[in-house]
Amino acid sequence: MPYTYDDQNIFAKILRGEIPNTTVLETEHTLAFRDLYPQAPVHVLVIPKGAYVCYDHFARDASDAEIVDFNRTIGRIVEMESLQEGGYRTISNAGQAGVQEVPHLHVHILGGRPLGRMLAPADGT
Ligand code: DGP
């Protein structure tokens, strides 16, 4: 399946420095920053710097270096935000069923409070 990347999406603008962000960690291939609308005391978004729409796009087309850097950054954020002991959740929404709002791959790291069960009852939103 071809992936069409919209370079006007909000995270592309953040990567170009056109929109401010609260950076938690930046590496060669990855940026981690605080979600503007946090749903937990810790809510960090981790994005690759490359133009990938979603997780399967990244898994298929990213270089090994990008994939390693992205995953290690997620691990480092968990450590930096002291989430290991209390636990946390990573989520990556994709496409329509996943209700992905921003079409640039991002992993949400959520923690700092009990997060409930993984999925709310489906109501189509
Ligand atoms: P998703 O539904 O998985 O595509 O989540 C997109 C997230 O992006 C959502 O939790 C809110 C966040 N977000 C939207 N606009 C901005 C922004 O301009 N800055 C930051 N830091 N986060 C944003």
Image (spheres, rainbow, N blue to C red):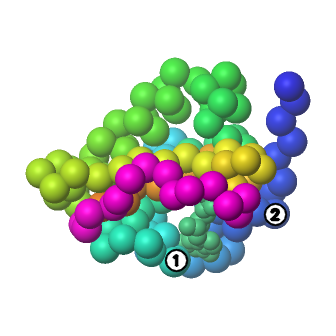
Is any atom of residue 13 visible in this view? no
Residue 27, given in percent of the width and then of the height, sits at 42, 48
What residue lies at 38% left-to-right and 53% top-to-bottom? Answer: 117
Residue nearest the viewer, comparing 102 with 124:
124
Q: Quadrant of the N terminus?
A: top right
- Of residue 24 and residue 78, the one placed in the foreground of this image is 78
SS type, badge 2: loop
Q: Residue at x 12, y 51 (%)?
A: 85
Split into quadrants, the picture shows ligand 1 in the one at bottom right
Residue 113 in the magenta stretch? The answer is: yes
Rendered location of residue 39, percent (x, y): 44, 72
Is 23 left or right of 3, judged from the image as shown? left
Q: Judge whether residue 115 is colored magenta.
A: yes
Q: Residue at x 16, y 56 (%)?
A: 86
Few, some or many residues within 10 Å of mark 1 (<14, 14–19, 20+): few
Could you say which disc has been placed on residue 36 in the image? 1
Splitting the image into 4 quarters, where does residue 41 fall?
Answer: bottom left
Residue type at the position of mark 1: Leu
Mark positioned earlier in the residue sequence (1 or 2): 2
Image height of 62 relative to 44, above or below: above
Of tags 1 and 2, the one toward the viewer is 1
In the rendered structure, which segment of residues is drawn in magenta?
112-125
